[in-house]
Image (cartoon, grey):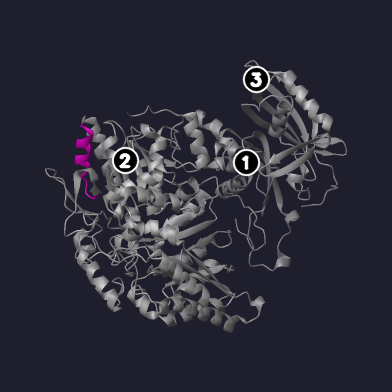
Amino acid sequence: MTQPFSARPQDLPTKAELARLRVEYVKDSRLSYLGHLDLIATIERCVRRSRLPFSIGNGFARRMRLQFSGALPVGASSCCEYFDLRLTEPVDAKVALDALRAATPRALAPTSASYVPGTLPALEAWLNRATWCVDLSGAGISPASVIEGIESLRADGKLTYLRGDKEKTVSLEQCLVDYSVEAKPDGGVAVGLETRSGNGAFLRPGILLSAAVERIGLEAPSVMRTRRTFQLHEEDGRLVEPFGPFAESHQTPVS
Amino acid sequence: MRAKRENLFDRLEPLLADVEHPARYLDHEWGACEEQDGPFHLCMVYADVYEVGQPNLGVAILYDRINAQPDMSCERCYLPWKDLSAKMREAGVPLLSLEGAAPLASFDAIGFTLAHELIATNVLETLDLAGIAISSDERDEDDPIILAGGPSAWNCEPLAPVFDAVLLGDGEESIVEVCACIRDARSEGLSRADILRRLAGVPGTYVPSLYDVVVDETSTRWGYAVPRVGEEVPEVVLKRAIGDLSKTPAVAQKIVPYMGIVQDRLSLEVLRGCARGCRFCQAGMTYRPVRERPADQIVSCGVEALLASGHNEISLSSLSTTDHSQCEKMLSGFNEELAEKGIRVSIPSQRLDSFGVDMAAAVAGGRRGGLTFAPEAGTQRLRDVINKNVSEEDIERAARNAYEAGWRRMKLYFMMGLPTETDEDVIGIARLAERVLEIGREVVGKGRKSGVSVSISVAVLVPKAHTPFQWAPQLDPDEVKRRQQLLLHEVRDRAIRISYHDADVSLVEGALSKMGRGGFELIRAAWEKGCRFDAWTSEFRFDLWCEAARECGVDLVATACEEYPLSARLPWDHTSPGVSKGYLQREWLRAVEGVTTPDCTRSSCTGCGVCSTLGVHNVIWGVRG
């Protein structure tokens, strides 16, 4: 776990030279209410507990070299979250996964780990496609009403909403790739969404579906459970999974 | 009536989507005790939000201790923020514990930590949200037994009608005895009144309902408490004190929170008690004697706990860490073990001498943020009055050493309204800050780029129970404001920044610190009017406190600013930390004369009475310099 702090700056390894372990983990049950910053601090502590040879940045704050996929909305769960951890020396990925699992709360359990090229772009920008499952219910909410609401919003091409006191606008043409709606046996509605993010644009499923049902005059859903089910990278019209296989060159800047 | 013990998280969860910081209510943190099988169930409550209460070391120690017992379980509970409280009331969800999400009203006992006086209305809010009667005499036979302890228990009289029993002093052993007593008494089928009688027999346990308040010519207007006729309870309840800290687990704080909390680090208690004898300091009087933990134990347990928790910082906590006789050994041990692991060691405050600066440098590594010193008073005369035992030379030397060691920002803590304080003493604060700034400019340079600055923070003295200043009046709020203005006008250099405590907040704190049992009416009225989270600047409602005081016929200024005769029987005289009243009286007289008293860990016994009364003594592992 040591780091050559005493070395001259020019002697320190650059980030790209360090082993880059990509870890997939879940965000489940109560911990879906964990905000992104708290999640980062929690995972950092899990890594410390795992005793893996993590690398520390050379800046004033000496932060662990750890990057995360895009923030989940608070309250949303996921089976496909990712972080990239830079190690000072490679550890067998299976051994690293076991060590992380033993040091992590069940609701954030790591599920896979594998080394990825050190030169890949930062995770948050790189994983720009996601699929979501949203279960919702409420007075008057049916598959037909949800479809009507979404289509009505789509016709506008964009969605404007308030986040706190700030007005935000997101392009549905860019961010909403596809969707599906079906009735659930319990009377609720299950919605599948495919979204795209990039250039600061991010479509929150909860915002979209609340706006959709409100657009047709219904009250916001009384219950809404959101789960991210896939995260992918879209490049030149093809979709790349988080663990690859990867193209040899990368157009986006290296993090 | 005792509520059913059941997990009600499903009823709470739907409310979390729309509240601020839902991570406050999640539980399942790393290190939390998941097995809560009881059969005896205690819930420790810190009546403020999670991020404020979770770092409390006292709660951590008791949580750890009870959960280590084979047939007892301990859970935690914090007061929800106002947004969730409102939603819970609307949805009919009672206050729940964290671990088991069980209604508070289903527990066998509930223990409140009284960290400060301004937590009073939050205690009432907690009980109300839990559906438990606020006053002890309104509770049903099988309702939970409501316990309290902590630093503010030393004048718990204004809240005495709330608590069934108050634990005085170190709680490690007494909490177990008290819980066992309740458990056994319940299993024997004793009535609630008899359970409380039995609790009064556990050393260090004060049962308010077994004492009457008498007001006569020997007392203040708040009276004094005496055993109720026919009750066999001690006239004076002595605190509990553990003899040897090294025999207790070094690391109590095992829970790693998910969210950022106010002291987001591993905290390890390196010593308990302080014998420096600062005359304003309640902790200094009530946590005696000094009991150090050996450096070897601190380092080995600290390193092990860091690896187990994943924290990247460890705080060596105590009232005065750099006084530890093995402080250097401790810090070098940590530096050796933690080298190049990105882990910081922090100590809460520095002594005003070169040793303190050396220690600060040892823990800071390459970082040089701000450095904090507490001269407390602006002139040597007043520092002698409060027995600070710090000279002008100490301060100058400390400042010079700190600037030479690379620090640029210095923070100085002072108090206003100390007994015998004059305008000259207030102006002395400004002069001292200027002198520290001048030293910085001498060492570093005068240009703006030198970055040399001094911040001064000025609190208002609130005279506290069981201190030599317990008889002293608090400074009138109008006079506080005048002296604050005087200080502001005296500081002319823009590199000196001043912050000071709100005079109104200090006034309420002062009144609550001086009142007797009659103060409960005021607290209850203030709570009924909506006072909550009074320690939060954004939430403190002085107008509501004034309204409540008017209705209760209490004059806040007259209460806080009243001087008690040295011979008067005080509202808290029936509880004792072991420091004799005679010692406090002598210290008060020496204060008025400006005579200092030495630290008994560096000289001979000063006769405070703790050791002989409690059968304990200072435990020092090395030699104090």
Quickly name the residue at label 2: B146
State whether residue B605 appears in this view. Answer: no
What label does residue A26 carry, if any? none
- At mark 3, the secondary structure is loop
Residue of label 1? A97
Q: Are marks 1 and 3 on the same chain?
A: yes
Which quarter shows the N terminus of chain B? top left
Residue B120 location, x and y as percent? 38, 48
Question: Label 2: few (<14), some or many (≥20) within 10 Å?
Answer: many
Which structural element holds mark 2? strand
Q: Residue furthest right?
A: A236
Residue A15 or A77: which is nearer the viewer? A77
Q: Position of residue A54 (x, y in %)?
A: 63, 52
Q: Nearer the viewer, mark 1 or mark 2?
A: 2
Kind of residue indicated by mark 1:
Leu
Identify the residue at image location x=38%, y=51%. B58
Q: CA distance from mark 1 to mark 2?
A: 46 Å
Numbered label attached to residue A188? 3
Residue B599 pos. (x, y %): 31, 72
Q: Is residue A36 magenta?
A: no
Left or right of residue B207, residue A155 in this image: right
**Of callouts 1 and 3, the N-terminal one:** 1
Disc 1 from disc 3: Cα separation: 37 Å
